[in-house]
Image (tube, rainbow, N blue to C red):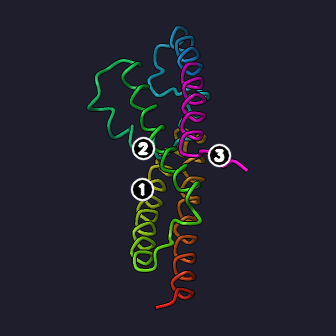
Amino acid sequence: MRRIPWPYVLPFCNTVVAAVLLYLGGQERAHYFADKMSAWDYIPPATQIAYLINFPAYILWSAARTLLPAGALAQNGCFLVLILALWYLIGVWVANKESFLSLARVRRARAWLICTVAIVGTATVGLFALADLSLHPLLGLGGLCWCLSLAWLSVFTMTQGKEKCQRAPG
């Protein structure tokens, strides 16, 4: 049976979905701005869903967009590149999760590194989610879901690493 190439399928699918959602959100935002003058904080639901699905990329994009030139093409292009990177990493993890902690000497350090990254990611995502929860509830809920997912990854990695370390000879 042929294995699914997750590191390529996940980024492609999520980038296409995000691009469509960002386009639809841009169309809705243009119509919304035509009717109201004070809509600077309005984020259309389609755009919120794109941010929700890719919340870690949204956090990095929020930090980087001050350095980017103004304009939807540069802003959305950067966000789509971050989505590619995020889902590529997730695809690599999904494709290799059986052998991810396989080497006897490296597995403890690798497990601690993944756990540390997941804990820092959980805290960062949680703080951004709580900040967005009052203004854009959809974004905040997406961030909290990612926060829980990263916390689960941390616990999963540590239990898998500990279990494999105990079973390994030497």
Q: Which mark is residue 4?
A: 3
Residue bearing mark 1: 124
Outermost residue, left side? 67
**Earlier along the polypeptide chain: callout 2 or callout 3?**
3
Q: Which mark is residue 58?
A: none
The residue located at (47%, 53%) in the rendering is 125
Comparing labels 1 and 3, the label whose residue is closer to the camera: 3
Label 1–label 2 contact, CB within 8 A: yes
Q: Which of these two is toward me, 33 or 2? A: 2
**Earlier along the polypeptide chain: callout 1 or callout 2?**
2
The residue carrying pointer 1 sits among few (fewer than 14), some (14 to 19) or many (20 or more) residues within 10 Å by Cα, namely some
Q: Give the quadrant of residue 48.
A: top right
Mark 3 element type: loop
Comparing labels 2 and 3, the label whose residue is closer to the camera: 3
The residue carrying pointer 3 sits among few (fewer than 14), some (14 to 19) or many (20 or more) residues within 10 Å by Cα, namely few
Q: Where does the image place residue 38, in percent across and percent down from the top left?
A: 46, 19
The residue located at (42%, 73%) in the rendering is 112
